[in-house]
Image: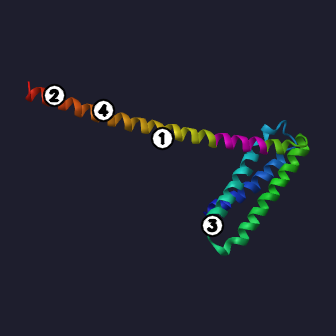
Amino acid sequence: MIGEVLAGAALIKSSVSAVKSAIGTAQDVGDIAGFIDQVFLGQEQIKKRQEQSNNLNSVAKEMIDDELAREAEQQIKLLVNMRFGSGTWEKIKKERTKRIASAEKKAKAQAIKRKEAIEAMIVCGILLFIAAGFAAFLAWYYINYR
């Protein structure tokens, strides 16, 4: 868990540095999209650690890491909006949120579909078992009472 946090903070720091160095030559947001994704990933790792942490002694470090992550996002937001126009960062965040929601919805739909398929197989298995029992009964009856 500590390694994950360090990775999250280091990922954010390296991504901000990479965006700063690449922003001047970037022709479109796609040129720096990987670095932006890394910032989001680093933030998710830090938030995940905060949710899982039960150590009261690390509260200050968690708060500082969270604040540093927010500052890094603000820096990148400013750089992206200055380079590609006002509102670009908000569009990126909105699209990211929309895609995450879509992926979660798709995963839930697949889980429901999988559950329904399993239930259908169970019902078919039960029906086959009943049919086999009935066929065995008929065979027994035919053999014994013919």
Residue at image location 75% in from the left, 62% down from the top = 66
Residue at far front of view = 145
Q: How far apart are marks 3 and 2 (CA)?
A: 65 Å
Q: Distance between the residues labelled 2 and 4?
A: 16 Å
Q: What residue does disc 2 label?
A: 139
Q: Which amino acid does label 1 sit on?
A: Lys
> How many C-alpha atoms fall within 10 Å of the one at disc 1: few (<14), some, or many (≥20)?
few
Residue at the (36%, 33%) spot, across then down:
124
Q: Where is residue 146 in the image (x, y as percent from the top left)?
A: 8, 24
Query: Residue 53 has which mark?
Result: 3
- Circles 1 and 2: CB distance less than 8 Å? no
Mark 2 neighbour class, 10 Å CA radius: few under 14, some 14 to 19, many 20 or more: few
- Mark with earlier residue (2, 4): 4
- Identified by mark 2, the residue type is Ala
Left or right placement of residue 87 versus residue 62 in this view? right
Q: In which quarter of the image is the N terminus?
A: bottom right
Would you name the residue on which mark 4 appears? 128
Q: Could you say whether the residue bearing mark 4 is in a helix, strand or loop?
A: helix
Disc 3 versus disc 2: nearer the observer: 2
Amino acid type for the residue under numbered disc 3: Ser
Whether the magenta-drawn stretch holds residue 101 is answered as yes
- Other residues around mark 4 within 10 Å, as few (<14) / some (14–19) / many (≥20): few
Residue topped by disc 1: 115
Label 2 secondary element = helix
